[in-house]
Amino acid sequence: MKKNLSLKHLYAPPGKIFDGGRKNPLLVLVHGYGADECDLFSLAGEFPDVFHVVSPRAPINLPWGGAAWYSLDFTDGEKFTCIPEAIAAREALHTFINEAIEAYDADPSQVWYLGFSQGAILGYGLMTTYPQQVKYYMPLSGYLEKAVVNYDVTVDDMKDVKVFATHGSVDPVIPVQWARLIKPFMESRCVDFTYNEYYMGHGISPEGLTLMRRWVDENLQKED
């Protein structure tokens, strides 16, 4: 049953409940600009049915429909992020994930995060600001927003974090050059980081989704 948490969200319970008192993992699906809580929810069906799945809705309702985690200002062809709203969104997600762990009795050591675009950008913010909260990240079509990421995070802080990232090589929204800056950052913190590019725009690659499913399966098996 869906609980009343700080962010409006969709919830799906695990199809397979672990026995022996072991808690099931939590999968958090975080949409991008202009989408909503329904956008990524169907992706839960791509993964093993062991997850509590939550898909929160961003707090800013857009006039043409959909929602945003933070505002974007387009001036002279450039895109500017409203940094105070982005930081507030990062903190809102941090709070929401903690609430969801407790409300749905999920395993706090087994939190998985899949985010697209703004959801991916905020994922990098959470990963570096609260590195012990989420163990597995799947940021798709994101980049490191300097004001949202904690660059002081250390190797020891991030020793348990694992990341599977993808990006389109002809992405017109978030240039692939921005995404390519992620790898040296992750390597400098010794993060278990997988990155794949695909000849596509701003979206989720079917091939990337296949590899991501395999990555999830392999890491779930390691947790058994």
Image (cartoon, rainbow, N blue to C red):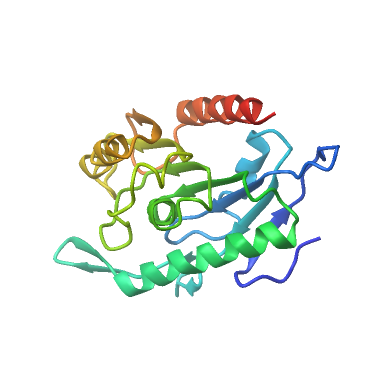
Tell me where residue 165 sits by quadrant.
top left
Which residue corresponds to the image point at 42% horizontal and 50% vertical from the top-left?
120
Q: Is residue 12 above or below residue 81?
A: above
Q: Residue reaching furthest left?
A: 76
Determine whether, in the image, residue 79 is placed left or right of residue 109: left
Which residue corresponds to the image point at 57% horizontal and 49% vertical from the top-left?
40
Determine whether, in the image, residue 89 is placed left or right of residue 178: right
Residue placed most toward the observer, 136 or 199? 136
Residue placed most toward the observer, 5 or 167? 5
Tell me where residue 43 sits by quadrant.
top right
Q: Is residue 113 above or below residue 213?
A: below
Is residue 65 in view?
no
Tell me where residue 203 sits by quadrant.
top left
Which quadrant is home to the C terminus? top right
Counting from the top left corner in percent of width and height, residue 69 is at: 44, 66
Residue placed most toward the observer, 216 or 202? 216
Counting from the top left corner in percent of width and height, residue 181 is at: 23, 41
